[in-house]
Image: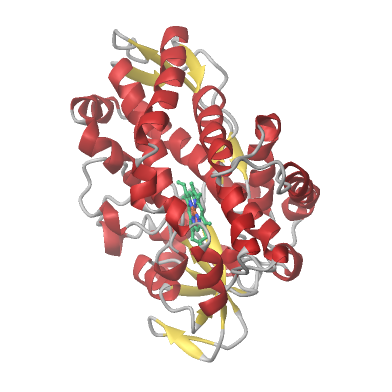
Amino acid sequence: MITPLSDTALRDADLFSDETLADPYPLFAALRDIGPVVYLPRHDLYAVVRHAAVREAVNDPERFSSDHGIALNSTANDQILLDAVLASDGATHARLRRVLSAQLAPRAIAQLRASILEHAGELADRVVAAETFDAMHDLAVPFVTGVVTELMGLPSEGNSRLAGWADATFNIFGPDNERTRASLPHSHAMMQYLSQAAHRDQVRPGSWLHAIYQAADAGKIAESECLPLMTAYTVASIDTTIQAITNALRLLARHPQQWRDLREDPASLAPAAFRETLRYEAPIQALGRRITRDTELRGVPLPAGRQLWLLYGAAGRDRLQWGTDADRFDIHRPGTEQQLSLGDGPHLCAGNHLAAMEATAMLTMLAERAPHLALDTAAPPARRRLNNVLRGWTTMPLSVSHEPPPAAS
Ligand code: HEM
């Protein structure tokens, strides 16, 4: 049940307060009721909250630019995201994106299927034997960091710190607030680590990072563009997928019939559960664009030079797109191919096939082994991780069993 917000609360809406980040959906619903795009004076941005408006904006980079437009503060836009694939447009963007396009194409990802399934199966075996486990720390974190660092060609020593650094880097896409400022040193530490551990003599031949150096050697990108590319792939690929897998398991644990359905038909319902999880709880809740000229979006006038904030999290709950039950999690929901939580248009998530492969592998391997999945009510409750951009968890205690768990009293 969504509590209506007063006009004053809406005019002063703070997208980044602890309260909003803990549960943003009442505010998103109230903003969608106002219109597809709503100006928020507190942040001096235009919040794009309806599905159709987000889709139109991400598909029109000439009017809505990523260059100096992704983040809500100048340190991120002018320094950290400089030369980043995520924060470029047109020919520069195409040149940077091409570097790893072969490695991330469906055919290349399909070849990883057996090893990803094996890795997921080993972790699933372990948690099923333990019966209670933390979905983040025992499954999603080791699984995703293992897959990604292997593909990147990074040495395994830095693995345990990558997820925390990547999480911090998402914080700095937000406004110049306490969370952003506290995260800057962690983001710098990641770049420092990558510039040493991912030195051209150390990366594994055949890996993503090796391909980045090869592109520089062939003159396709400048040497100075190597580190921003490595950082982009590290940041984009880790916490996003960790949170998607954690959320999927949490939601399935809360919907036992859907877990049983998934067990019956994992080939089609594991990918469907992944898409529905992304719609329902976008791991990247929002990113920005710069308005390049006086224009309009879905009838709302927009002035040149100002900031758009594309709320993927709000688009996923838009009743105009998803119907009156948009706030319900349902892996049988039709049309989830249209969800926007992996973006769309030229910046559509470059790792979308890999993310889907990882998530469906983990769901399938656990579903094969665990007849019942539930929240572990004997453990301290799951804790949310509040981040300016990422929506996720710090812990997620779950349990698996062969017998149904006793009904809660
Ligand atoms: C469930 C997991 C993931 C989610 C929710 C996610 C989400 C997104 C979104 C929303 C964008 C679009 C940004 C925009 O519109 O400005 C994006 C871009 C990107 N993603 Fe992902 N992502 C995920 C996993 C991955 C993985 C595994 C990789 C690793 C290869 C990756 C690499 C990238 C890159 C490099 C971009 C920038 C693409 C460009 O600017 O052309 N992502 N992602």
Residue 324 quadrant: bottom left
Q: Residue at x 67, y 31 (%)?
A: 160
Q: Is residue 278 left or right of residue 295?
A: left
- The residue sitting at 50% across, 12% down in the picture is 378
Residue found at x 44% / y 18% = 122
Find residue 154 and report its horizontal and vertical position in percent.
64, 39
Q: x, y percentage for residue 166?
A: 65, 45
The image quadrant of residue 359 is: top left
Image coordinates for residue 383, horizontal then vertical, percent: 58, 31
| Left or right for 326, reference 358 | left
Residue drawn 50% across the image and 71% down it: 94
Q: Name the foreground residue: 254 vs 128.
A: 128
Q: Nearer the viewer, residue 8 or 170?
A: 170
Name the side, left or right, on which 361 lies relative to 206: left
Q: Is residue 75 above or below residue 307?
A: above
Across the whole image, how many numbered discs are drawn on residues? Answer: 0
Please identify the quadrant where the C terminus is shown: top left
Q: Nearer the viewer, residue 354 or 127?
A: 354
Above or below 368: residue 153: below
Residue 16 visible in image: no
Outermost residue, bottom side = 294
Color style of the picture:
secondary structure
Residue 155 seen by the camera: yes
Q: Residue 245 at x, y = what percent?
A: 44, 36
